[in-house]
Structure formats: structure tokens, C-alpha cells
Image (cartoon, rainbow, N blue to C red):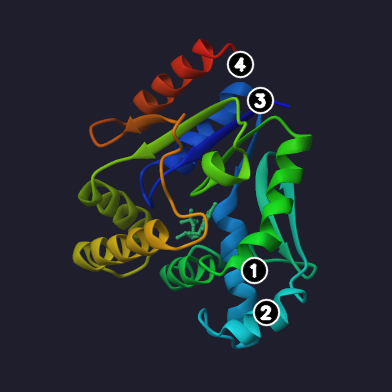
Amino acid sequence: MKNIALDGPAGAGKSTLAKNLAKALGYQYVDTGAIYRTIAYHYQMCGIGPRDKDNIHKFLGDANIEVKYEAGVQHMILNGTDVTDALRTPELSSFASTVSANPEVRKYLLQMQRQIAKHNDCVMDGRDIGTVVLPRADLKIYVTASAEVRAQRRLLELEAKGEKTSFAKVLADINARDEADMNRTVAPLKQAADAILLDTTQMDADEVLKAALALVRERGL
Ligand code: DC
């Protein structure tokens, strides 16, 4: 199977690129952030805080998570219920970041991600795909952009969904999340030694896709 790993901080344009690239190549798009968000949602529903190690351990086995695809769109199923639409709130972004630092949680979700990649040509986006989940990926791209541009993009996304927030709040959230994701002990966000850096600060989605497709062609994928 062919696997492309996309990593980078929040709002860098990873998921837009991953979706566009997967569509152009006929691969499956795998959003691993949604998997971490689903586990965070599980704990939120159980009334467990993201730092409550004992209960995180105790309730981990109660989360039966399935990843399903309908017409190429990823759906997250938690204990039989489709929770996809509940996952993209700022609260869950922060909860998912904190709970994802727990080594047991990461271990629990690692095999799931590897199994998907083993059975599908895929573009997988996340934080540790090139470094930990798929160290032998055919192509690794580390997507980044300035914090201000990333915050602006995230603000537009949130506003489009009707959420009331401000640039300053979104920028502060993004900086706090990157700080946590880059400095956790297990599988922190970092560029893999063999990943190609793609800085999207000055690029629109089409330009980013073009740049990635050039890399894909170079690798003969
Ligand atoms: O990509 P996202 O914003 O949906 O991810 C939410 C959080 O999940 C992110 O802040 C850190 C965590 N995450 C992770 O630790 N490893 C991944 N491969 C993907 C996401």
C-alpha cells in the first residue's frame, strides 16, 4: 500500500491538503486528529477530565472506536454512535491535545492507525505520522505556516460555523496547543528527519496541492 504522512501544527492547512491530495490520487484520507478527538469526546461524556490519569486508564477499554468511510468522507463511530459532527469544537481541540499526551491513549490508538494504513493507499494527517505511526511512509511532508496565518484561517473556519470568537483568542488557543503538542514526552509534534518542509504561509490551497503533487511525482507515487 502507498502511504503519505502529513504532519504539522494546528491550522497549517494539513487537512485541506490531505483531502485534496487524497482525491487527486484516489487514496483514502485519514484524519487522525478526529480519532484523538473521539477519545476526548468519550472522556467528556463519561465526565472524566483530560488529566485524570486513573480514570483515563479505567475507561480506555470502554471506548469502542471505529473509523468508517462513506463516499470518501471519514466518520467516527464511538460505541455504535456516529459522533463526527460533535468533534470540531474549540473545547474538544484543547481536550484532545491534553488527553493525547497520555502514553496509554497513544498506544491504544497506534495500532488502529497502522491497520488503516496497512490496508489502504492513504494520505494520513496528524502530529506523529512520519515520526511514529508510519516511519516507512513513501512520502512525508511537514506542513507549517506562521502562527498568525494559522489563527486567521482557523478564525474563518469557526466563523463560517457560526461560532463567536476573536482573533486574539484563536491565536492564544493555537499557540497553547502547539506548545503542548510539541513538548509532550511521548510522540511530540516534530518534523521527521526525512520529511519535506512545506511552508504554506504565503500559499493558497491550490498552490499547496500543486507543490505536494510535484513531490508525489518525484517519488513516483
Ligand atoms: O489535528 P487536530 O487539530 O484535529 O488534532 C487534535 C489534537 O489531537 C491535537 O492538538 C493533538 C492530538 N493529535 C495527536 O496527538 N496526534 C495525532 N496524530 C493527531 C492529533
- Choose the circle earlier in sequence order: 2 or 1: 2
Element class at badge 2 = helix
Residue 54 x, y percent position in the rendering: 63, 86
Q: Nearer the viewer, mark 4 or mark 3?
A: 4
- Choose the circle earlier in sequence order: 3 or 1: 3
- Choose the circle earlier in sequence order: 4 or 2: 2
Q: Residue at x 36, y 44 (%)?
A: 12
- Choose the circle earlier in sequence order: 4 or 3: 3
Q: Quadrant of the C terminus?
A: top right
Question: Compared to 216, does 16 lie above or below?
Answer: below
Marks 2 and 1 close (CB-CB < 8 Å): yes
Residue matched to label 4: 221
Residue 145 x, y percent position in the rendering: 28, 41
Q: Residue at x 54, y 55 (%)?
A: 33
- For the residues marked 3 and 2, what is the alpha-carbon distance in whole angstroms? 38 Å
Q: Quadrant of the N terminus?
A: top right
Residue 20 x, y percent position in the rendering: 51, 31
Residue matched to label 1: 104
Residue type for callout 4: Leu
- For the residues marked 4 and 1, what is the alpha-carbon distance in whole angstroms? 34 Å
Residue 118 x, y percent position in the rendering: 76, 37
Marks 3 and 1 close (CB-CB < 8 Å): no
Question: Compared to 173, does 15 lie above or below?
Answer: above
Q: As rendered, which of 149 and 194 lies closer to the eye?
A: 194
Q: Which mark is residue 132?
A: none
Q: Which mark is residue 26?
A: 3
Residue type for callout 2: His
Label 1 packing within 10 angstroms: few (<14), some (14-19), many (20+): some
Question: Compared to 187, does 170 lie above or below?
Answer: below
Q: As rendered, which of 138 and 125 lies closer to the eye?
A: 138
Element class at badge 4 = loop
- For the residues marked 3 and 1, what is the alpha-carbon distance in whole angstroms? 33 Å
